[in-house]
Image (cartoon, grey):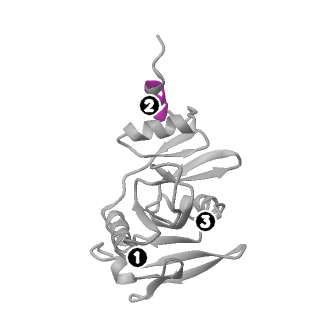
Amino acid sequence: MALPLESRAMSALLKPDAWLSPKAYLECELRSEVRHEYLGGHVYAMAGASRAHNVIAGNIFAALRGHLRGKKCRAFINDMKVRVPVKGRDVFYYPDVVVTCQARESSEYFTESPTIIFEVISKETEAVDRREKLISYFSLPSMKVYVLVDQYQRSVEVIRRSGKDWRLENLKAANGKLHLPEIKFELAMPTIYEESGI
């Protein structure tokens, strides 16, 4: 007797060589206790994050949430996916923090129009965050700024769209500020790393 679609799809999540449709993936994620990123039909479980990673992402989200309250743009943390069409296939990533300024989205569970994305990088995710995700995110017309936050030292890299190119800014000063004129916002380095132990 064949398993129902939901059971087959959930079983497939555990097999990296299995193929899932975007619809089946999204349905499974609603019920899954573990988050998975989706790359053109294949799913990959996400590893747990460190205490510092969680504190840093939380600090960024809290500051953005307060600043954006009552405004057009909104900030989301952890569970809001970003959908990117890559070479005719869907990709879904879970950024640490995402800001979207799109008034209406096609889904309650993902955005297709991020404006700013923050990734708190780790040794395990750094290569993917710096290459694959960078290229994927900037293929989206709405995307303006990609922020990579180091969880081991006070260091922030800002990659900003500048016409058809990208401009890199490095912040390392202990009391430096991350400037985001796109949403009229500044975020001080001490606020980013507050209570993280870094």
Which secondary structure lies at badge 2? Answer: helix
Circle nearer the N terminus (2, 3):
2
Q: Which mark is residue 142?
A: 3
Q: Which SS does the magenta portion mostly show?
A: helix
Which secondary structure lies at badge 3? Answer: loop
Q: Which mark is residue 10?
A: 2
Q: Amino acid at mark 2?
A: Met
Q: Which residues are magenta?
A: 7-14
Q: Residue at x 51, y 72 (%)?
A: 147
Q: Residue at x 56, y 32 (%)?
A: 18
Front in this rendered view, residue 167 or 106: 106
Seen in the picture, residue 56 relative to 50 is either above or below; the reply is below
Q: From the image, tell me which residue sits under label 1.
A: 153
Mark 2 vs mark 1, foreground winner is: 2
In screen coordinates, is 183 left or right of 21?
A: left
Label 2, label 1: how many angstroms apart (C-alpha)?
A: 38 Å
Q: Amino acid at mark 3?
A: Ser
Label 2, label 3: how many angstroms apart (C-alpha)?
A: 32 Å
Circle nearer the N terminus (1, 3):
3
- Marks 1,3: beta carbons within 8 A: no
